[in-house]
Image (cartoon, grey):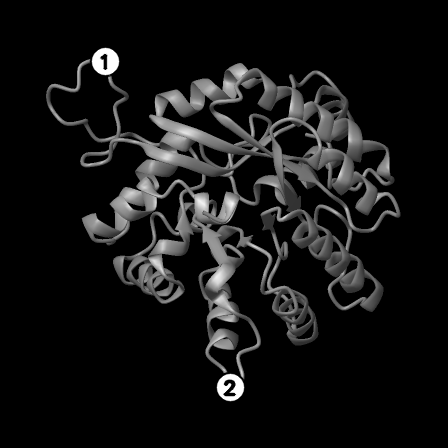
Amino acid sequence: MSKHLRNAIAAIALLSVSATVFAAADPGAGDAPQLPRGIRGAAIDVHTHVISQPLTDALTGGGVPASTGEDLIARLDEANVEKAVVLSLGYWDVPDDSNMAPENDFAASIVAEYPDRLIGFCGINPRYDSALSEVDRCLGLPGMVGIKLHPVGGSGLDWENPEHAAAISAVLDAAQGHGAPVLMHVTAAPLDDDGLISALRVIGAHPGVRLVVAHCGGVADYEIEQYLIPATSTPPLINLENLYTDISACLAFYRDAPKSQRELMVWRLRKWGIERVFFGSDYLSLAPVETPREALDTLARYPFTQKEIKMILENDASAWLFGD
């Protein structure tokens, strides 16, 4: 495996999760997908990716097929997931902005194949002077309604660099101007104090932006508390009203942890507010953390109440996506 591919897998997928064995579905399900007992699918997977052939070749050295809409839809169908947010990898640092517009165009083309099932997000790298114009251009494409940011690990940004923090802030300003939702992978590893304060200040300065902080705030279980505690400080540093999270990757990492650890994850998500927790898989055909079907199985391993699981899986994320 090439160094580029190892880095890509680490930054895009974060984790390597093996395939899982699913519990039998309810009797009489017929040809319905075989899902974990008591789970019948989801309204939306808010965290999936697609990658074009040129970027796939750049990261792998060639010989690996790019994403297809057909594959993504098949993965949704086997999990009985109605829709998915498709996150462009236009934010990827390659190391210039030549990737940004073509990758966004590729994601838009996938969305256009299945406009009733897929919702597109523009991948934006704030490092580049073209970032703000690409926000305007990409959000004008059919089916592209939001922005994906991946500052650390994907875009080569540093929260402790004031210029980088200002560039991220400018993209959030643009998102607010368009009324567009944002999904942000805030960091690729736990931030130190200065980096965390910078990130929280940028997020806190944009309370009107409908923002998903991906992966339970950062995969490691305690990272979600980096948002919960500032939200309850006096005065609060951030406002959770327009702040959401998804369960991609973070639940997968702790899926075989002791029950006490999984109970702690559930408690933290309850503190966040289950109504602001979205189902997500982080699916990317090149380096899948989990398929949507595997992510459903992972969710079933956690001690949520049936009411909470129902709330997560039936949430169509419209409040975040469209401000409904």
- CA–CA distance in space, label 1 to label 2: 54 Å
Q: Could you tell me which residue is drawn at 60 percent across and 51 percent down?
A: 185
Specify few, some or many for label 2: CA neighbours under 10 Å numbering under 14, 14-19, or 20 or more.
few
As drawn, is 133 to the left or to the right of 295? right
Where 207 sits versus 78, above or below?
below
Q: Could you tell me which residue is drawn at 37 percent across and 30 percent down?
A: 293
Q: Nearer the viewer, residue 1 or 19?
A: 19
Q: Could you tell me which residue is drawn at 71 percent across and 46 percent down?
A: 154
Look at the numbered discs 1 and 2 and tell me whether their residues touch, using CB distance below 8 Å: no
As drawn, is 167 to the left or to the right of 270? right
Specify few, some or many for label 1: CA neighbours under 10 Å numbering under 14, 14-19, or 20 or more.
few
Q: Could you tell me which residue is drawn at 25 percent across and 44 percent down?
A: 310
Counting from the top left corner in percent of width and height, residue 14 is at: 57, 45
Q: Nearer the viewer, residue 94 or 277?
A: 277
Residue under label 1: 31
Where 42 sits versus 222, above or below?
above
Counting from the top left corner in percent of width and height, residue 128 is at: 86, 47
Tag 2: amino acid? Thr
Q: Nearer the viewer, residue 200 or 57?
A: 200
Counting from the top left corner in percent of width and height, residue 186 is at: 62, 57
Q: Earlier in the sequence, mark 1 or mark 2?
A: 1
As drawn, is 129 to the left or to the right of 214? right
Mark 2: secondary structure = loop
For residue 53, the mark is none
Tag 1: amino acid? Asp
Q: Quadrant of residue 315?
A: top left
Between marks 1 and 2 in the image, the one whose residue lies nearer the viewer? 2
Residue under label 2: 234
Residue 157 visible to an observer of this rendering: yes
Counting from the top left corner in percent of width and height, residue 165 is at: 76, 63
Residue 67 visible to an observer of this rendering: no
Mark 1: secondary structure = loop
